[in-house]
Image: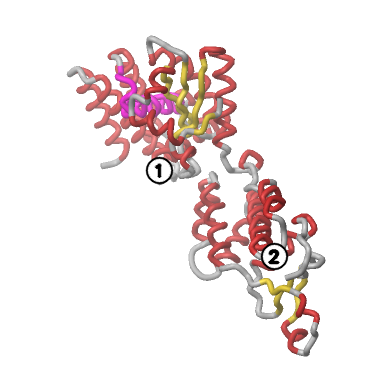
Amino acid sequence: MGWRMLEPEQVDLADLALALEDHSDEHTWWFDPETGAVEPQSVHALEVGDDEPVRLLPITPLPVALGYGDMEDFVACVRDIRARDLLDRAIVGRGAFRRFKDTLFDFPELRRAWFAFHDARGERRAIEWLVERGLVDARAAEQAMASRGDPDPAEMPGLLDAQGLARRVAADLRRMYRKRLRAVLLVGPWARGEAQPESAVELVVVLDRFTDRWSEKRRMERVMWRHSMRNDAVVTEIPVTAIEFEHAVTPLLSRAVAEGVRVA
Amino acid sequence: MEPLERGREELRAARALLDTGFPSQALTRAYFAGFHAAAAALMTTGQSPPTEAGVLAAFSRQASANGHFAADDARALRKLFEDRNDVDYALAEAPVHEAQQAVDAAEQLVASVSRFVSGPR
C-alpha cells in the first residue's frame, strides 16, 4: 500500500472511534493513512467528483450490536438497584441508545462512568481497526491497548472493584496473621468474571496450619464484616491450611486453584 | 408461603435437626431462616432483590443506611451465609456449639424482623 507505519498516538483515536460507530446517512468518514487524520465527508461532496478520497481509506461503521453489548456490559456492573433496573429497561427494543443516554441524565456519576467506559472500549476498537489494516505496528498497538483497559471500577461510582476489595481484606489479614498467612485468593463469580453486582466476594484464606477452622473463622469475622459494611458488599472467607490447598482436597479447592485470583 | 412464615418454618427445622444430632444441617437451615426473614423485611420496605446475594446486600444496606434493622442482625446474616457456604462446600463440619449459636442468631433475626414487620414505620 506504500505508506509508512503510524504511531497509534498520531491518530485521533477518539475521532476514529466516533467514526466507527457513526451509521449516519448524511456523511461518510475517511482515514488518511499518511497523516492519520480522520475526516467526515458529506455524501454530496463525494458525488461531485472531489478526487481527494482516492488516497483515503473509507471507515465503515462497526455493527450496532457492539455498542449494544457495551451498554449491557456496563449495566451489569451497576450496583445501584434502581439505576440498574431503569437502565436494564432502557436498553430493550428500538431506541435503546437514546433511552439509555436519557436515563443516565438522572445519574450524573454513572453518566461520567459510562463515558469513561465507552471511550476506553471505542479507542481499543479504533486501535484494532488500525492494526487490521496494517497502519500501526502491532507491538505499539498492544501497548496502546493496554493503556486503555476498561476503567478501574474502584474509580467508578456504583461499581464494585472486587479485586481491590479483596486486596484490602488481604492486607488486614496480613497484619493479623503475619507470616502465618500464605495466600488469599478471590474465588467464585468475581474470579470467573460471572459476577452480578451484588455477588458475594468470596475469599479462600490459606494459613500455614491450624487446629480449629471455626476459631480462625471467628477471628476473621470482624475484618469480613468491616469490609462488607464499608463496601456495601457481602465478603466471605473460608480458611484452609497450606496442605489442604496444595492437595485441593475438595471440589471448592480444586476450583480455587484453577480459577482463583491470588491477591496476597 | 410468605417469607417470614417460611423463615419461622426453617427455624423450627433447624432446631429439630440440632436436637437430633445434625449440627451442620441445622446450621444450613438456620441460615435459610435468617435469609427468608431478611427477604420479608425487605418486602415490607418495597424491595424484592432478585438474587440471594442481593437480599443480603440490601439487608445490610437497610441496616446501615436507614436503621430499619439493627446492624447486628445484618452482621449475623452475613456470618450465617458464610458458615452455611463453608459447610455446604464440605470444608467444615459444624460443631454443635457453632450450630447452636447459628440457630440462636437466626431466632434473634426472625424475632427482630417480626417486630419490624408488625410495628409502626
Chain identity of mark 1: B
Whether B84 is among the magenta residues is: yes
Quote the CA–CA distance across marks 2 and 1. Answer: 37 Å
User: Residue at the spot x=49%, y=26% of the render?
Assistant: B71
Chain identity of mark 2: A
View extreme (bottom): residue: A48
Badge 1 element: loop
Residue position for label 2: A18
Can residue B36 be seen here?
yes
Residue type highlighted by circle 1: Thr
Whether A260 is among the magenta residues is: no
> Is the residue marked by circle 1 packed among few (<14), some (14-19), or many (20+) residues within 10 Å?
few
User: Residue at the spot x=69%, y=74% of the render?
Assistant: A58
Circles 2 and 1: CB distance less than 8 Å? no
Residue position for label 1: B51
Relative to A93, B20 lies left or right? left
Does label 1 lie on the same chain as label 2?
no
Closer to us: B66 or A167 = A167
Q: Quadrant of residue B77?
A: top left
Badge 2 element: helix
User: Residue at the spot x=36%, y=21% of the render?
Assistant: B105
Residue A33: horizontal and vertical position, in percent? Answer: 76, 68
Relative to B100, A138 lies left or right? right
Position of residue A215 relative to residue B108, above or below, is above
Q: Quadrant of residue A9?
A: bottom right
Magenta part of the protein: which range?
A: B73-94
